[in-house]
Image: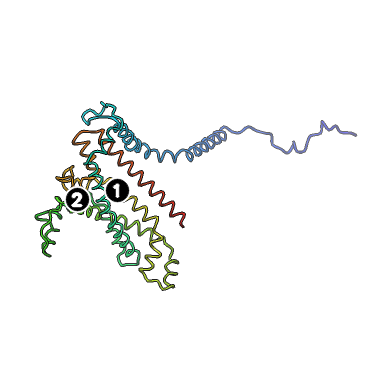
Amino acid sequence: MTVSLKSAPSASAEGADPPRKAAPADRRAHRRAARRSRWYRRDTKWSPYAFIAPFFLFFAAFGLFPLLYTGWASLHRVSLHTPTEMDWAGLHNYTRLLKDEYFWNALGNTFTIGLLSTVPQLLMALGLAHLLNYRLRGSMFFRVAMLTPYATSVAAATLVFAMLYGRDFGMVNWALGLVGVDHVDWESGTWTSQFAVSTIVIWRWTGYNTLIYLAAMQSVPNDLYESAALDGASRWQQFVHVTIPSLRPTILFTVVVSTIGATQLFGEPLLFGGSQTGGASHQYQTLGLYLYEQGWFNYHLGRASAIAWTMFLILILVGLVYFLVARRLQKSH
């Protein structure tokens, strides 16, 4: 007897469950999972931009816009009373600076005060960092104390130093009188006033640079010091031949940052004498003070903008020098 294959039931068909549609709850769960996956991909892609967006917004409002506005204003004759009324002047404000003796005086004062404050400051910071690099009792206390001047308000620090350098009742003149030196009128003299302003800068920024050097020193491998000690090098020789070469990039960085700070020096000379002229004879008027005088006292906003952009160009030159020197150091290594 023959059996038709068509009529014979399949064994697999008998044992298998009939296909069924996915439940609505399962479909909703699948859609939620897909939606979460899309949101996760978008979050990982765009959230970093959202985190850094506030910085760029504030930079555009308080950094980029003033820079562009002062650049445009520097090409016009414009008064602070009517900043929206501008008369085209081209490069007149810049060429006028080249003939302005007060501008060159402020530029020279800025260079002198910067030199008097930067060189001793960095040398002292390097020596203090070398001392703190050794294991000392209470080293954490000394490191925190180094930052105290930096955390102090520039107004408070400058007013205290102004009293210390007072002509009649200042403590500095009192100490000089003990050794037979006559009272010095620190504010009236050219070199004395610039020296006094420089000491304020040194006091405020030495600790800050000390901690930068200390962090760099702690990254120097101990193997170098051990090898130098085995060769019979003293601590001073280790400092000169191991520490200093290892700190060259850091030293160059602090020199550039200090130079930028010296170019923008404003608060210390302003509060030291209490005048935007930097003394009766402009003896310690910096570029920042000269800009302040032209813009907010003489109301020449165009001239003040030209001074600001001149300072900006000077800083660009400093940055280019830093780039070239750093590149040369990398090639030498």
**Amino acid type shown at disc 2:** Thr
138 or 33, nearer to the observer: 138
Residue 286: x percent and y percent?
23, 45
Residue 310 falls in image quadrant: top left
Amino acid tagged 1: Gly
Residue at 67 percent across and 33 percent down: it is 19
Q: Residue furthest right?
A: 1
Circle count: 2
Q: Nearer the viewer, mark 2 or mark 1?
A: 1
User: Disc number at residue 25?
Assistant: none
Q: Nearer the viewer, residue 156 or 198?
A: 198
Of the numbered discs in the image, which one, if any, rests on residue 158? 2
> How crowded is the residue under tag 1: few (<14 C-alpha within 10 Å), some, or many (20+)?
some
Q: Position of residue 38 (x, y in %)?
A: 52, 36
Nearer to me, 116 or 31: 116
Q: Quadrant of the N terminus?
A: top right
- Residue 78's place in the image compared with 207, above or below, is above
Q: Which residue is farthest left?
A: 168
Q: In the structure shown, which secondary structural element does the residue marked by tag 2 occupy?
A: helix
The residue carrying mark 1 is 261
Asked if 327 appears above or below 17 in the picture, the reply is: below
Q: Quadrant of residue 218?
A: bottom left
